Image (cartoon, rainbow, N blue to C red):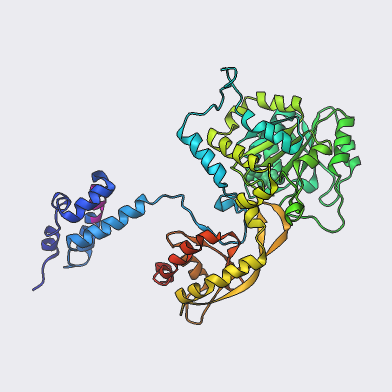
Amino acid sequence: MLVSSSQVRRSIPSVDALLKTAHFARLTSEFGRPQVVACLRELLADQRRRLSQADAAAVPDEETLAAECGERLAAAARPSLRPVFNLTGTVLHTNLGRALYPQEAIDAATQAMARPVNLEYDLDGAGRGERDAHVEARLLKLTGAQAAVVVNNNAAAVYLALNTVAAGREVLVSRGELVEIGGSFRIPDIMASSGCQLREVGTTNRTHARDYESSINERTAAIMKVHTSNYEVRGFTAAVPAAQLAAVAHAKGLPMIEDLGCGMLVDLEGFGLPHEPTPSESLAAGVDLVSFSGDKLLGGPQCGIVVGRKDLIERLRRNPMKRALRLDKVRLAALEAVLTLYDDPEKLRIQLPTLRLLTRTATDVQAQAQRLLAATQQALDGLAKVDVAACASQIGSGALPVETLPSAALRLSPQAGGPSEEALAAAFRALPVPVIGRIHEQALWFDLRCLEPSQEAEFTAQLSQVACSRALG
Ligand SMILES: *Cc1c(COP(=O)(O)O)cnc(C)c1O
């Protein structure tokens, strides 16, 4: 005998009755009553809708309802910002949060979060202190600058420098340096928003000292040099070295500003890596203000640092926008801890995750890939062919764009009739700790450079879940 849908609908249990059952009591204690009630109402409404469409569908029992409710609540409770495995091969990946804090910085940041700190309090004089003072002395030692300020990021640093030194006036920049970094930072746009007028000098591939000299007029406030960090102009090119440009600026009594982008504090060649310009080199060449990021090669928290001439830095500090762009106590604590590591280069190479990952040898990564090969092959049996392949890692965040580091990857190649490389990538992204790789030559590549050996067990433990992923259909 057929049961009418209205009869079935009447058999849907009430929210109150369900909440009294043991299954729902467990949910209530985990997620709180209001969340469970709201979710249950939603679920029962879905049931009623379904019943009105398909006659005589069965009402799920309370256990099934509780399981569905539990799944929905767990999904809603899951944080939006979550850890992932960065196996893209790009060490400083802007979309994956750039540099990782060393343990010393994590400890310092945690302290600053949990306890009152002398952020702007002078413990000697019991008076008001300056927050940047906690890192300034170390920055001066590392760069040879007279003074330093720290702000939210390098974009803020460039903004503050331009707004302070050149608002309402002109700044000369080479046409070859009007760069865009990561879509949202463009030199012409930051110029405009900081209130100065961009005056383009020279051509895309060649700019000479005379181009700058002939563009200087009574409205000129500064000359700016931008490190073309994410591309390289090759062939028939000419750019004016910082020292010569500083001389041109100083001859007219103008300051010279440089946006260095990465600004590694020490010479990377000492670690077997390609050379990246340092702030001390710029200052030695006569640049008056140099800005760079804290979370690129420096390996610290997100921040922007400006070092340079004391009188100019003083003006930056007095700019009302400094307050809006200033660094919070947590990142200041982390930055101080990171800068302290720079006292000892050997310790730095081991303790600073950015350098530790960048200096891993291809042989080391290759051995790791071999270690993980069998477990990965087993987990993907019948889904994809897995082998170890040589690849090239990138530093990322615009540093040394044309230099790569030899590395090794687990390469997942689709099999006939099996999931595509895109479906495989989606399945790995859907894991509890999403694994982010790179699609290249019809395969999914997991460059293991950024998989710390201590995380291998966590990586392999979730591999068995790939085969049952919804992403594989
Ligand atoms: C990365 C970069 C920036 C932006 O720095 P953020 O710290 O991301 O704000 C600006 N200029 C150059 C040359 C860069 O490389």
Residue 249 within the magenta-colored segment of the rendering: no
Of residue 228 and residue 136, the one placed in the foreground of this image is 136
Hey, which residue is sitting farthest left in the picture? 1
Residue 220: x and y in percent read: 81, 30
Secondary structure mostly seen in magenta is helix
Q: Give the quarter of the figure containing the N terminus.
A: bottom left
Relative horizontal placement of residue 295, taking residue 269 as reference (left or right): left
Where residue 273 appears, x then y in whole percent?
Answer: 73, 56
Q: Is residue 91 above or below residue 217?
A: below
Task: Note whether residue 407 is visible.
Answer: no
Q: Is residue 93 left or right of residue 25?
A: right
Residue range (magenta):
37-43
Please say whether residue 40 is one of the residues in the magenta stretch: yes
Q: How many marks?
A: 0
Viewer-proximal residue, 96 or 374?
A: 374
Q: Is residue 240 left or right of residue 359?
A: right
- Pinpoint residue 290: horizontal percent, then vertical percent: 74, 37
Residue 346: x %, y % from top left: 68, 50
